[in-house]
Amino acid sequence: MTTRYDEADPFLADLVASEGTHALELLGHVLAPAEAPCAALRERLLAAATHEGRLWRFASEVAELLDVSLERARALLDRLDDPSVWTVVSPGIALFWVEGGPRVQSATRGFVRIAAGVRTPDHEHVGRETMFVLQGALHDLGNGLVGRPGDLLQNEGGSSHAIEALPHGVDVLQLAIAEGGIRIGGTLFGPR
């Protein structure tokens, strides 16, 4: 008889879909109760399995860079796993524009998702650019630096470069703040 996890428990269905049936065996070994776990334990386990809070370790830096509250930074970080917030601008590259506080109103600011192995177009920065890496690893082809989660990379106004998400890894997620905007192929993309 085939077990239909999606009918029995959505959490187990998600677990099987993402990790395979061996995850159920591991889960059974971890819990291994003599009787069914109480409802409170099950709720704690389900809450821990959500993506909420997975990037909160960067909330202080994001709050500072965007000039927003810590609570707002956490809410923005939680939204990064929601496909509906992203605008695909080219294959493998998507943007999530965000509002910031007064200090960044004259900047183009948002989160950038770059699929592993994908390269952004060459572009020039009108003013200083600040990139804060949240996930994955990137290579700044202008200055040769490699950024990993927690790294802050900056480029001066007038500098040009492209970014490549390192292949064979996870997608890059970064916060980018470009004072005055960026130029791609002679077109200025100003503050949003």
Image (cartoon, grey):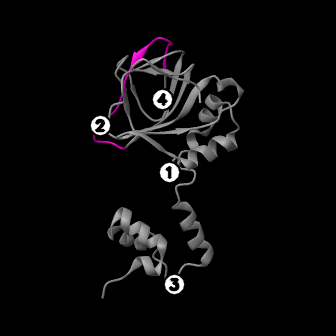
Picture quadrant of residue 61? top right
Secondary structure under the numbered disc 3 in the rendered image: loop
Visible residue check, residue 67: yes
- The residue located at (28%, 38%) in the rendering is 167
Of 128 and 145, which appears nearest the observer? 128
- Residue bounds of the magenta highlight: 154-170
The answer to whether 72 appears left or right of 180 in the picture is right
Picture quadrant of residue 178? top right
Q: Which mark is residue 39?
A: none
Visible residue check, residue 82: no
- Which of marks 2 and 3 precedes in the sequence? 3
Inspect the magenta stretch and tell me whether residue 190 lies in it: no
Q: Where residue 162 sits in the image (x, y, percent)?
A: 37, 24
- Which of marks 3 and 4 precedes in the sequence? 3
- The residue located at (61%, 29%) in the rendering is 65
Relative vertical location of residue 75 with respect to residue 46 in this rendering, above or below: above
Neighbourhood count class around disc 4 (C-alpha, 10 Å): few under 14, some 14–19, many 20 upward? some
Picture quadrant of residue 5? bottom left
Q: Where residue 173 sits in the image (x, y, percent)?
A: 45, 39
- Which of marks 2 and 4 precedes in the sequence? 2
Residue occupied by mark 4: 151
Secondary structure under the numbered disc 4 in the rendered image: loop
- The residue located at (30%, 88%) in the rendering is 1
Which one is in front in this view, the residue at disc 1 or the one at disc 3?
1
Which one is in front in this view, the residue at disc 4 or the one at disc 3?
4
User: Distance of mark 2 from mark 1, alpha carbons?
Assistant: 20 Å
Of 129 and 166, which appears nearest the observer? 129
The answer to whether 59 appears left or right of 21 in the picture is right
Amino acid on which disc 4 is placed: Asp
Residue occupied by mark 3: 35
Residue occupied by mark 2: 117
Q: Where residue 57 sits in the image (x, y, percent)?
A: 57, 42
